[in-house]
Image (cartoon, helix red, strand yellow):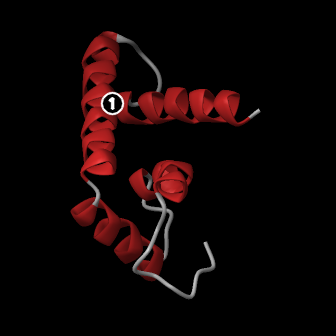
């Protein structure tokens, strides 16, 4: 995300970069930008809480399944859903 005005992430940008944020794949500046947006935007804050809840619930469902760690599996499901919506 190359931005000069870091105080004004749009909600669309927030949603587009959320997976990278959750996976810790953002640099410090991008992470700070997203965290500022979460503080000022109740809608995106709620969305983030819903994503965390979904990941947690999917992790509980898949906790007895062998293979990928629940959080990794949950993020993979979220990435696939996001890619499908972007297509």
Give left or right: position of 70 versus 10: left
Q: Quadrant of the N terminus?
A: bottom right
Q: In this view, does 20 lie to the left or right of 35?
A: right
Looking at the image, is 36 positioned above or below residue 25?
Answer: below
In-front residue for pair 49/10: 10
Is residue 10 visible to us here?
yes
Q: Position of residue 34 (x, y in %)?
A: 39, 66
Task: Give the SS element for disc 1.
Answer: helix
Residue 78, x across and y down, in percent: 50, 31
Q: Exactly how many numbered labels are in the figure? A: 1
The residue lying at 46 percent from left, 82 percent from top is 6
Instruction: Describe residue 86's horizontal placement relative to residue 73 as left or right.
Output: right
* Nearer the observer, 77 or 62: 77
Is 86 on the left-hand or right-hand side of 35? right
Q: Which residue is painted at 57% across and 36% down in the image?
A: 79
Q: Which residue is drawn at 50% across and 63% down?
A: 25
Measured from the top left, where is residue 81 in percent x and y? 58, 27
* Displayed quadrant of residue 38: bottom left
Considering every residue shown, the one lying at the far right of the view is 87
> Looking at the rendering, which quadrant does residue 7 occupy?
bottom left
In the rendering, at what x and y percent does residue 18 appear?
46, 51
User: Is residue 20 in view from this perspective?
Assistant: no
Characterize the local packing of mark 1: few (<14), some (14-19) or many (20 or more) Cα atoms within 10 angstroms. Answer: many
Query: Which quadrant of the figure contains the C terminus?
Result: top right
Point 48% across, 62% down: residue: 10
Which residue in the rendered view is the most extreme toward the bottom? 4
Asked if residue 29 is positioned above or below residue 61 in the image, the reply reads: below
- For disc 1, the marked residue is 55
């Amino acid at each position: 995300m190359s931005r000069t005005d870091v105080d004004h992430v749009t909600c669309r940008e927030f949603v587009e970069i959320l997976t990278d944020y959750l996976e810790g794949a953002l640099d410090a500046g991008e992470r700070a930008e997203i965290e500022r947006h979460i503080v000022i935007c109740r809608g995106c804050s709620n969305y983030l809480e819903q994503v965390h809840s979904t990941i947690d619930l999917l992790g509980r469902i898949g906790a007895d399944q062998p293979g990928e760690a629940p959080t990794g599996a949950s993020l993979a499901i979220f990435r696939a859903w996001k890619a499908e919506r972007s297509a």
